[in-house]
Amino acid sequence: MKFFKFNVIQAPKRPIIIVSGLPRSGTSMMMKILEAGGLEILTDHQRTADDDNPKGYYEFERVKQLPDRDTEWVAQAQGKVVKIISFLLQHLPTQYSYKIIFMRRNIAEILASQRQMLLRRGETAGLEDQQMAETFQEHLKRVRVWLKNQTNMQVLYVDYNNLIKAPAGQIQSVYDFLEIPLDLQKMLAVPDASLYRQRKG
């Protein structure tokens, strides 16, 4: 009896698309842009839309457990989009490849947006704005150096302020970076200048 050996061809692993940045930097808007383009979003819908994010947060709660080594869920994120704030990127498992869209926004606007959100919740910030701005700036410097040294991560930096004022160029950069067929026209329809409420300069 002859036995035939078949080579099993495994489908290539698809990169995980991550939308990252500081809180209140436009990550939710970018998630909506990618969803409109046709990408599948990894979210559990536990955090629902409110006055601070009228179009939704697009969060996945287990992301917050990355520092506790809860990474089993990462495998199911391949080929999908997940939102992960910049403070948690270093906890991602290294056996996967990632394409990271990193949102940048004027720090003063981020602080103003956070302050307004805390006021709505009846809370107060732990640090003064100047201290928080310095903390954020130092963090961004460190995370940019760290990202530059990761061989399994590609990064595209997107400016939130320009995304609102002139979306075409920013969204075209995202489209080119991902190298996936997406509905560019639907993506362009997402940025909403009416939600740009904390303008500085």
Image (tube, rainbow, N blue to C red):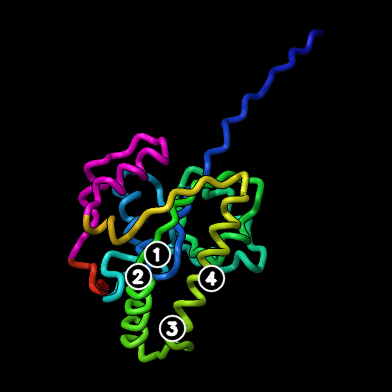
Q: Amino acid at mark 4?
A: Glu
Query: What's the distance in space between the residues labelled 3 and 1, CA to CA?
Result: 34 Å
Query: What's the distance in space between the residues labelled 1 and 4, CA to CA?
Result: 32 Å
Task: Verify CB contact (< 8 Å) between mark 1 and mark 4.
Answer: no
Q: Which residue is mark 4?
A: 138
Decide which of 85, 41 is in the foreground and name it.
85
Q: Is residue 19 visible?
A: yes
Bounds of the magenta span? 166-193
> At 56% across and 60% down in the image, what residue appears?
89
Disc 3 residue crowd, few under 14, some 14–19, many 20+, Cα 10 Å:
few
Q: Which residue is mark 2?
A: 48
Q: Which residue is mark 1?
A: 45
**Total of numbered circles in the picture?**
4
List x then y, in percent, for residue 137.
Answer: 48, 70
Query: What's the distance in space between the residues labelled 4 and 2, CA to CA?
Result: 31 Å
Query: What's the distance in space between the residues labelled 3 and 2, CA to CA?
Result: 31 Å
Q: Amino acid at mark 2?
A: Thr
